[in-house]
Image: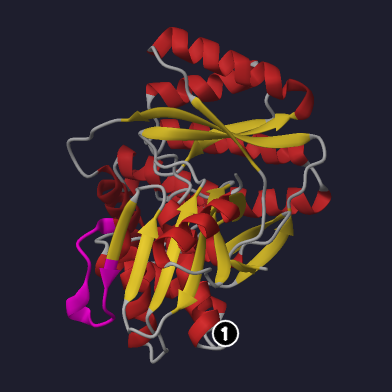
């Protein structure tokens, strides 16, 4: 049974009559541009063909009645601050409602059933897809689409900050709201300007290889790396590493610790790699895109030191198999590699990755094909 049909069936069972409108919003990948967001650089995400989908119908009782098919759980809550639900998944929906209301928007009671096919724990931002799905839907149902798309993304981000305890950036929600089929988006994390770039390879596929490992860390590695970047920027008298060239950094190398230099070097080089990948895509040069992906992995592993043995193994395996490009996707220390794989090598690469990884680490990685698709939308 297709997801939409399953949602409709359960909506009828739960609420006694057919539902209303269907909405969906996507998970996301980031092709290149890691750890650049907090350095006011660029990120390069795209929405994917894996979504959160919801059926939503306004009711006249002033409360939200929600059922999650995937968790098999029901929640009911009002729309005032004191009405926050206990269930963590329901707080995402409640937070979106509250953030719209706080901005002067209109939200009334509604019934909803939702489900998704975004793999959990794979770094594809299922939470942002959930927020974006409901932000888009409530804007359509109760506000005549008067809230602009950037504000919808900010509503999702504020939901994470204020109701879910995650101090995230805006990339995930941005990609989920603004996603466009066959295009990636370069987002400037300084001024939030963005531009679409074509991404519709005719002879390659995007394949995620999920190591299914996440290493426990004893310190705060992300904070430590951010502090390194901030120290270097301050020493160079600039607001952020966005304003630093590699030549400037190298000219002052003796002013920094080796660790701080290497952290900053990766960020400065990664900022330029995003721009180079954009130019390569405009030329249709996917070989150059792949080279830059491998460079990013090397930098994340050796200079930024956020890789791990399993991810280095997968990237090395990809290179041996002739994969065009491969790198860590996300913060690191586990999770996925994202791979740009020639069509004629895809089956062989996947089989080799499963076999060799299992032989070395005792379990197979999960494999996900992804296609760059549209973001938040109403489904007729």
Give the residue at x 20% y 76%: 83
Residue 375 seen in render: yes
* Magenta span of residues: 76-88
Left or right of 27 in this view: 186: right
Residue 249's x, y, as percent? Answer: 45, 51
203 or 378, which lies in front?
378
Scheme by which the image is coloured? secondary structure
- State whether residue 70 is above or below residue 309: below
81 within the magenta span: yes
Q: Quadrant of residue 169?
A: bottom left
Give the residue at x 39% y 40%: 121
User: Can you identify the residue that label 1 sits on?
Assistant: 145
Residue 225's x, y, as percent? Answer: 31, 47
Residue 39's x, y, as percent? Answer: 42, 59
Q: From the image, which quarter does the C terminus lie in?
A: bottom right
231 or 61, which lies in front?
61
Left or right of 168 in this view: 288: right
Residue 170's x, y, as percent? Answer: 44, 65
Q: Which residue ends up furthest to the top in the rendered image?
A: 359
Give the residue at x 32% y 84%: 62
């Amino acid at each position: 049974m297709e997801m939409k049909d399953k949602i409709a069936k359960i909506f009828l069972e739960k609420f006694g009559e057919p539902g209303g409108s269907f909405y969906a919003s996507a998970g996301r990948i980031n092709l290149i541009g890691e750890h650049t967001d907090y350095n006011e650089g660029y990120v390069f995400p795209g929405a994917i063909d894996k979504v959160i989908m919801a059926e939503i119908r306004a009711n006249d009782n002033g409360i939200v009645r929600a059922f999650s098919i995937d968790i098999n759980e029901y929640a009911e809550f009002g729309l005032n601050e004191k009405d926050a639900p206990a269930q963590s998944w329901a707080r995402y929906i409640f937070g979106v409602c509250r953030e719209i209301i706080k901005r002067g928007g209109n939200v009334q009671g509604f019934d909803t059933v939702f489900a998704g096919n975004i793999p959990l724990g794979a770094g594809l931002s299922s939470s942002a897809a959930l927020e974006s799905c409901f932000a888009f839907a409530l804007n359509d149902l109760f506000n005549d689409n008067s809230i602009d798309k950037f504000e919808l993304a900010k509503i999702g981000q504020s939901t994470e900050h204020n109701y879910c305890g995650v101090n995230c950036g805006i990339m995930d929600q941005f990609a989920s709201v603004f996603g466009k089929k066959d295009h990636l988006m370069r987002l400037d994390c300084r001024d939030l300007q963005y531009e679409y770039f074509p991404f519709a390879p005719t002879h390659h596929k995007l394949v995620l290889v999920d190591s299914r490992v996440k290493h426990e860390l004893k310190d705060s590695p992300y904070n430590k790396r951010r502090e390194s970047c901030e120290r270097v920027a301050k020493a160079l008298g600039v607001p952020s590493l966005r304003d630093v060239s590699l030549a400037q950094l190298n000219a002052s190398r003796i002013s920094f610790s080796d660790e701080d230099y290497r952290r900053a070097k990766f960020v400065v080089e990664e900022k330029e790699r995003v721009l180079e990948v954009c130019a390569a895509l405009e030329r249709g040069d996917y070989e150059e895109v792949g080279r830059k992906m491998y460079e990013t992995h090397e930098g994340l592993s050796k200079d930024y030191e956020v890789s791990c043995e399993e991810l280095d193994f997968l990237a090395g395996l990809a290179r041996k198999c002739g994969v065009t490009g491969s790198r860590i996707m996300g913060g690191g220390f586990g999770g996925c590699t994202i791979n740009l794989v020639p069509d004629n090598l895809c089956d062989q690469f996947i089989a080799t990755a499963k076999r060799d990884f299992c032989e070395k680490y005792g379990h197979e990685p999960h494999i996900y094909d992804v296609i760059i698709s549209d973001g938040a939308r109403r489904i007729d």
